[in-house]
Image: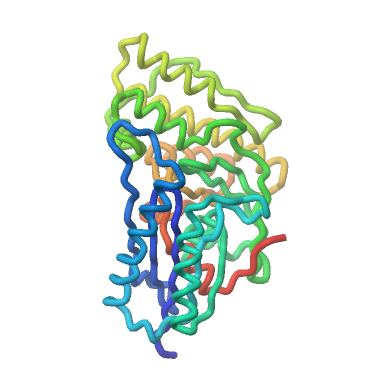
């Protein structure tokens, strides 16, 4: 079989992504451009992100065209919305969807659309044993999303049901808000991970607000940690080590409760926050102790990328109920 290429395009809230994989799931290109956030700002408005995607994506397409034989492209896939439900919508995804559709017509290739969340799951199951399970749990933890999912993955069809998660802030929002409070540049997660490695977990009674086994609130924790920063003399290293240990504990409790409720022993943990080293180490140890098997997305594929979209497009996944 001659080498064929499968393209994935994702234009999320903070990253323009284009990836190319081949027949054997080798990653040929993983191109990403982080959207620029002005110093002192805590994020981007959708119209600002759309404008940057419009400028970024042609540059990534140009780079791709110089690296591969575009005559060997089989399928072009894109993310078209945050989640695979009718009411899910964000303007940023229209940019990638439009460019992917135009490319598919020009190159006369197959064209497929998936949700951003399905792309994260695709990145997690690619070259990972969990892809062989007909049903599994997944925790999607990122800047905009903290959702516990029940994934049906049978006969090349993927359907996703939200069964838990945050009722207010996402975990990524909590992390960035604490990071900004400490004077770090947005987005803060990578730098906070690095700093936390030098800290020790404080012996504090941090509030955790769990609801109905698999749901929780984080606004109280935000206030608690901001108060620690303002009113106490703890080091930022110890504060961040404690923050990530607390987040890991909440995630562990939610996963364990869902394991009991749904009688499932396998969970995929994905999204940008899942790259955090304290979180990975804590969950790996605690879940294995309870005979729950955690599967982690590769570190380099945790944050937003086009690889997962390219993979599920290559496999021809059908999505929805």
Name the residue furthest bottom. 1
Task: Please tell me which residue is depicted at 49% across the width and 50% down the height of the picture.
Answer: 270
Q: Is residue 68 left or right of residue 124?
A: left
Task: Please tell me which residue is depicted at 66% across the width and 67% down the height of the picture.
Answer: 157
- Quadrant that contains the C terminus: bottom right
Task: Please tell me which residue is depicted at 36% across the width and 22% down the height of the picture.
Answer: 239
Q: Is residue 191 left or right of residue 319?
A: left
Q: Is residue 165 left or right of residue 52?
A: right
Q: Is residue 302 visible?
A: no
Q: Residue 304: horizontal and vertical position, in percent?
A: 42, 53
Q: Is residue 175 visible?
A: yes
Q: Residue 63: horizontal and vertical position, in percent?
A: 28, 70
Q: 44 above or below 53?
A: above
- Quadrant that contains the N terminus: bottom left
Q: Residue 223: horizontal and vertical position, in percent?
A: 48, 18
Q: 205 above or below 256?
A: above
Number of on-image labels: 0
Q: Nearer the viewer, residue 197 or 34?
A: 34
Structure colour scheme: rainbow
Q: Nearer the viewer, residue 127 or 302?
A: 302
Q: Residue 295: horizontal and vertical position, in percent?
A: 50, 52
Task: Please tell me which residue is depicted at 42% across the width and 81% down the height of the picture.
Answer: 73
Q: 206 above or below 283?
A: above
């Amino acid at each position: 079989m001659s080498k064929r290429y499968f393209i994935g395009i994702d234009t999320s809230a903070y990253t323009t992504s284009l990836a190319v994989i081949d027949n054997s799931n080798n990653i040929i290109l993983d191109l990403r451009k982080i959207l620029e956030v002005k110093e002192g700002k805590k994020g981007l408005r959708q119209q600002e992100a759309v404008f940057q995607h419009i400028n970024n994506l042609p540059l990534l397409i140009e780079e791709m065209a110089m690296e591969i034989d575009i005559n060997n492209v089989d399928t072009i896939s894109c993310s078209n919305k945050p989640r695979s439900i009718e009411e899910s919508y964000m303007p940023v995804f229209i940019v990638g969807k439009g460019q992917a559709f135009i490319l598919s017509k020009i190159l006369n290739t197959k064209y497929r659309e998936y949700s951003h969340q399905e792309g994260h799951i695709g990145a997690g199951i690619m070259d990972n044993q969990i892809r062989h399970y007909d049903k599994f749990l997944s925790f999607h933890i990122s800047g905009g999303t903290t959702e516990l999912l029940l994934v049906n993955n049978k006969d090349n069809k993927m359907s996703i049901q939200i069964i838990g998660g945050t009722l207010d802030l996402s975990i990524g929002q909590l992390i960035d808000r604490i990071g900004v409070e400490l004077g770090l540049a947005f987005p803060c997660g990578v730098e906070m991970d690095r700093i936390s490695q030098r800290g020790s977990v404080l012996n504090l009674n941090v509030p955790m607000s769990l609801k109905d086994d698999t749901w929780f609130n984080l606004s109280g924790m935000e206030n608690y940690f901001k108060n620690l920063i303002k009113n106490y003399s703890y080091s930022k290293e110890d504060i961040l080590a404690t923050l990530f240990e607390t987040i890991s504990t909440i995630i562990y409790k939610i996963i364990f409760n869902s394991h009991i409720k749904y009688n499932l022993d396998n969970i995929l943990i994905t999204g940008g926050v899942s790259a955090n080293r304290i979180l990975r180490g804590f969950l790996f140890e605690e879940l294995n102790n309870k005979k729950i098997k955690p599967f982690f997305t590769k570190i380099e594929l945790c944050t937003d990328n086009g690889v997962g979209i390219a993979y599920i497009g290559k496999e021809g996944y059908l999505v929805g109920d």
